[in-house]
Amino acid sequence: MRSHGIQSVLILANGDSPTATLAKSLAREHQVILVTDGAVEKLDALGITANSVCGDFDSVTNAARVRWKHLEWIDTPDQNHGDLEKTLQIALSLGAERVTIIGASGGRPDHMLANYSLLLRYCAQVDVTIANETSTVRALCAPAIIRMDTKVGDIISIIAAQRSICTGAGLKWELPSQLEPGTRAISNVAVDEHVEITMISGSAYVCHLTSTD
């Protein structure tokens, strides 16, 4: 796959399947779509196609191999990393500046926690988001700023991965002067159409839950 000019990559992981509506919407917004291993089985139901299938292919049926034989199959046999991380590394090798991951939740809790930990590991290299129908999760590693388009009433939760200092704008409640891992800064509320989080030191997850009003 040629990497010239690739800025955005969508990754479909093999966790709980997103809705077809979300998958189609995000597929239109990204230049390249990568699929991890057995998630290729979900493409027909989601109504999207992909550029490449990545993984060790231990959970891909022969029928799927035949159905999607026209795709690029990238074998990544390294057992020291999971299929999602290997696929994210491929996205980085293509020069991606923005990566969105869907299908990363559900299933085994260790797999899900590991998937979310990738946000912390790679946030200094690329703007990476795990998304579903009602929320997005990103990580901030200082020094960094995240700006979000919001609706008034959206929930914004900040969950520290370590002792951190951060500030927020467009939120109902001021963030604590020092943020520790725990529940101190969950369920804040957007009071503007734009929210900005500035990470001065440390690192944290930033969860944006869309208001249903």
Image: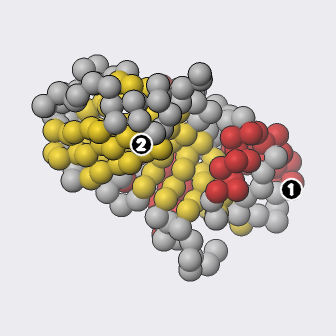
Count the marks: how many? 2
Q: Quadrant of residue 30?
A: bottom right
Q: Which residue is mark 2?
A: 194
Q: Nearer the viewer, residue 69 or 10?
A: 10
Q: Quadrant of the C terminus?
A: top right
For label 2, the SS is strand
Q: Is residue 90 visible?
A: no
Q: Residue at x 51, y 55 (%)?
A: 99
Viewer-side label of 1, 2 = 2
Residue furthest to the left: 177
Instruction: Give the residue number, with chain letter if any, for mark 1.
Output: 66
Left or right of 82? Residue 73 is: right
Lateral position of residue 102 relative to residue 121, left or right: right
In x, y percent, where is residue 178? 13, 31
Quarter placement of the N terminus: bottom right
Q: Please rate how many residues cluster around mark 2, counting C-alpha atoms within 10 Å: few if below 14, some from 14 to 19, many from 20.
A: some
What amino acid type is highlighted by mark number 1? Val
The foreground one among 143 and 169 is 169
Residue 55 screen position, x and y as percent: 60, 54
| 137 up-or-down from 84: above or below | above
Which numbered tag is attached to residue 102?
Answer: none
Residue positioned 64% across, 65% down in the render: 31
